[in-house]
Image (tube, rainbow, N blue to C red):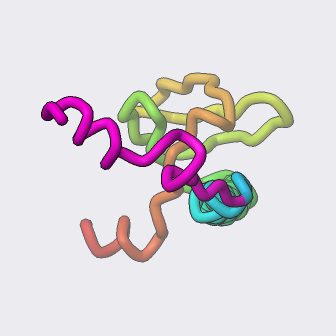
């Protein structure tokens, strides 16, 4: 016998010893699905908290409030309308801005402490 015949006899045939175990493909992907669903709910929860915080801040927009705008301008609200807010940025200089431009309402106690 030559060497190739010995190797051919020792190697298992295609149907004999080389059985592949196939499982349910859903079980294989189950950890990935769980992680994706968990990330979705965590993101949705964070967005809901951020939206509630934004709505609470928008409800505090009243005349006399000191605000910081998204452009970095700091001013005092002169008038609140439905679609715009009049903000005084210096003496006799009033600009109209959208309510969505307000980034932060500065608390009254922090402005008094700064004086």
Which quadrant of the figure has residue 97?
top right
Vertical side of 16 occupied by 31: above or below: below
In the image, is residue 51 part of the stretch drawn in magenta?
no
Quick check: can you spot residue 57?
no
Q: Residue furthest right?
A: 82
Counting from the top left corner in percent of width and height, residue 34 is at 65, 64
Q: Looking at the rendering, in which quadrant would you find the N terminus?
A: top left
Quick check: can you spot residue 31?
yes
Q: Residue furthest left?
A: 3
Q: Looking at the rendering, in which quadrant would you find the C terminus?
A: bottom left
Counting from the top left corner in percent of width and height, residue 77 is at 60, 44
Segment colored magenta: 1-23
Counting from the top left corner in percent of width and height, residue 103 is at 51, 45
Q: Residue at x 14, y 34 (%)?
A: 3
Which quadrant of the figure has residue 48?
bottom right
In the image, is residue 17 part of the stretch drawn in magenta?
yes
26 vs 42, nearest the viewer: 26
Counting from the top left corner in percent of width and height, residue 22 is at 65, 55
């Amino acid at each position: 016998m030559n060497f190739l015949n010995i190797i051919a006899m020792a190697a298992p045939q295609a149907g004999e010893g080389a059985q592949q175990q196939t499982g349910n493909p859903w079980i294989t992907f189950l950890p990935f699905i769980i992680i994706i669903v968990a990330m979705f709910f965590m993101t949705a929860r964070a967005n809901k908290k951020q939206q509630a915080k934004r709505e609470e801040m928008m409800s505090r927009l009243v005349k006399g409030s000191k605000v910081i705008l998204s452009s970095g301008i700091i001013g005092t609200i002169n008038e609140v309308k439905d679609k715009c807010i009049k903000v005084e940025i210096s003496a006799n200089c009033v600009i109209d801005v959208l309510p969505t431009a307000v980034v932060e309402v500065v608390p009254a106690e922090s402005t008094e402490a700064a004086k």
